[in-house]
Image (cartoon, helix red, strand yellow):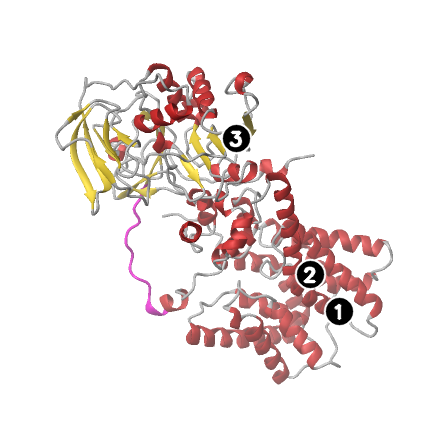
Amino acid sequence: MIDFSFRSGLTLRIPSPSPGPPEKAEVITEEAGLRASAGRAPRVSLDVEEGALVPQGATVARLRKSPDVCFVAPMPARVARIGLLQGHRLSEIVLFHEAGGDFIRHDTSQACTAPGLRRLMQTAGVWQWLGRRPFGGMPKPDDQPGAIFVMATDTTPLAPDPRRAIAGQEEAFGRGLHALTTLTDGPVFVCQQPGPALFDGAQSGGRLRTVNSGPRHPQGAPGLRVHAHFPATIARSVWDIHAEDVAQLGTLIETGYLPMRRLVSVGGAALREGRLVRTQPGADLRGLTHRIVQPGPHIVLSGSRLDGHAARWLAPRHRQVTVLPRPAAGKPPHWLVAALTRSAMPKPVIPNAALDQAFGAALPAAAFVRALGSGDDDSAMKMGLLSLLEEDVALADYVLGGDAQLPEILRAMLDRIRTEFAA
Amino acid sequence: MTRGIWTRETVVLMLLAAYLPLALFWLWYGGTEAVQRLGLAALVLAFWNLAFLLARAQPISLAMAVTALAIAMLAPEGLGMFHLILGISFGAVAGELVFGGWGRNVVSPATVALSFLGFGFSGYPWPEFLAPVAWAAIPAALIGVAMGAMPAALVASAVVAAVAAVASGLLPPPALPAAGVVLVLLVADPVTSATTLLGRWLNGALYVGLVTLFALGWHGAAPVQYAVAAALLTSLAAPVLDEMALALWYAKRRRRHGQN
C-alpha cells in the first residue's frame, strides 16, 4: 500500500540567501547569555557573582527547587551581568568569553546507572536540552518518561541537517543512545529521513527503534512523531532530544567533557549571505549575524521563521537564527477600513487543503483547530493535544495567516489542563 | 513580516475563482434577467451583512458573493421581488449571520434560502440549466479542488457514486446537470461539509444517494428542487458523518496506543 502520509506536509519557500562558503566552521561569539526557553523564567539560586571567572562547564546557577539541575557556562568566561527578575527568577546571565580558559571535567564514574546518568545530565547542563510532553518545558528531575524521541531529522525550513551535525560522531551518538535507554523502561525512537542507519541497535534489546519520516514539514516536528508513535498522556510523559545533543551526551559519558557546540544555521531575508556555523549554546545572535546583515532595520529571531521569537541569545533548544527585515511602521488604516476589518472575535478558520497538510495528515486538522478555537479540552485531548506544543502548530498558524492564533490558544489550553489535573 | 495566505478571505477568493466559469456561462445565457437576480441577491445580502457589522461588529466577508450567486442561479423562477427578498433575508440571517458570520455557520445560507423559497412558495417553476452552463460545473469543481478550497474527497466520492448510480440505472441522466451544479455550489462548500477524510467520502456519497432516492420516489419534483433538498439534508448530516469518522479514528488509535 502506498503510504500517502509519508508525502504529506508542505514545502515552504522562506526567502534566504544561500549559505556562503564555510570558511569558518566554528564561531564562538564574544558574549553568550544563559537563559531559559521562551516563556519561562525559573527560580534559580546563583553559584557565582558578577565578575567571577568560570571555566567551561562550570555551574553558574541552579534551579532553586531541584538544585541538581544546573545552568552551566558554555565557554570559559567571565560573568558580566546577572539579570534576575522578581523572586529570583532567571532573566539572563551574560558571559564574556575568556580565551584560553579552563574546562571542567565531570565525574562519569556513576554514568552507567540510571540515577548516576540522570545526575550527570543535570549537573553537566544536558537536562535543559530535553523537551517534555505534555505541557512542554524541561522534565522534572525525577520524571520517568514512557519513551524518548531522538530527533535526527528536522524539517523546519532552513534548519541545519542533523545528519550533518552528527557526522563524524557516530560512535558518540551510539553511546548516547544506549545511555538514554537506561532512563526509560519504554522504547527510544530515532526519527530520521530514510538513509543509512545511524546506530547499531544490536545490544539494545529491541528498545531502540528507527522511525522514518518524510521530507516535508511538519513530518520532522517532534510533536507529530510523538503523536504518531507514542502519544503522551498526563500519566505517561514523553521526552524528545535532538540527535546532536545525544552525540554530545555520548562524548560527555566517554571523556567527562561536554562539548558545548552545536550546528546552527543563520538565514532569513535580511541577510546578505547565509551561514552554517558551529557555535555555543546561548550564543550572541548579533555576534552570529555580524557583517552578513543587510543595512536597514531588521529583527533577529532565535528559532525558525515559524516558531522563533525576537531574542538576544540563542534559546537552549534552538538551532536556527532567522533575520527578517523589520517592516516599516505604516500609516494606521483609515477608521472606516479598520472598523470593517477588525472583529470582536478572531475570524473563523475555513477548512482547506493547506490546513490538512500543515498537520501532516496525522490528525483531523479542521476538527482539531475547531476544538482549539472553541475551547473544547476533551475533544482536543482525544485528538492528541497532549503530544503537541506550540512549535508543532506553528506551521498551521503560519499557513492560516496568523488569524487563528493557534500557538497562543494551544498554550492557554495546555495550561488550563495542567492546573485542572494538578488539582 | 510575511505570512501564510490561507485566511478566510483567501478561501473565498479561491471559491470565487472556481465559480467564475459557471457564473460567466450562466450570465451569458441568462441575459438581463440573470443579472437582475444576481444584483438583487447581492444587494439584500450586503444590507444584512452591513446590519450585522454595525450591530455586532461582525466583519464583512466576500462569501456573500458566493451566496448571492448560488441563490440567483438556483432560486425558483417567476417569484416576485418581495418573495425573493424575504427568502434571501431569512437564509442570510437565520443560516449564517446569527451564528457569527461565514465560517461559523452550520448550513450554507444559500441552502437555507433556497429551501425556504422552495417549500414556502411551491408552485413556481424551478430553473433548468442549459448544457453549457451544466458543463461549466466541471471546470468549477476542478479549479476548486486544485486550489484546495473545495474538499477533493467529497467531489471525488460524489463523482464515483454518480457514475455508479447512472450505470446501474437508478439515477436518470436528466438529473445530472442540476445535481452537478448544486454539488459545486452548495454541497462542496468547505464550511458546511464534513472535514475528515472519511466524513468527506461519506458526505459526497450521501448526497448522490439522496438525489437518487428523490429522483426515484419524489414524483413531480424538478431536478433542482430535489438536488437542493438533498443538499440541505446532507449538510445537516455532515457533523454526524464527521463524528462517525472521528469515533472510528479514536477507536483505531486506542487499539494501537492503548488508553489515551
Return the residue at label 2: B183
Return the residue at label 3: A186
The residue lying at 44 percent from left, 36 percent from top is A157
Return the residue at label 1: B226
Chain for mark 3?
A: A
Label number found at residue A373: none
Quarter-of-image position of residue A245: top left
Relative to B13, A137 lies left or right? left
Secondary structure category for the residue under label 2: helix
Task: Using the rendered image of the protein, determine whether residue B41 is visible from the camera's viewpoint.
Answer: yes
Magenta stretch: give its range: A324-336
Q: Amino acid at mark 2?
A: Leu
Secondary structure category for the residue under label 1: helix
Picture coordinates of residue A123 (x, y %)? 30, 27
Relative to B21, A380 lies left or right? left
Chain for mark 2?
A: B
Viewer-proximal residue among A355 and B66: A355
Q: From the viewer's perspective, is the residue at label 2 or at label 3 nearer?
A: 3
Chain for mark 1?
A: B
Are the residues at dot 2 and dot 3 in contact (C-beta closer than 8 Å)? no
Q: Amino acid at mark 3?
A: Gly
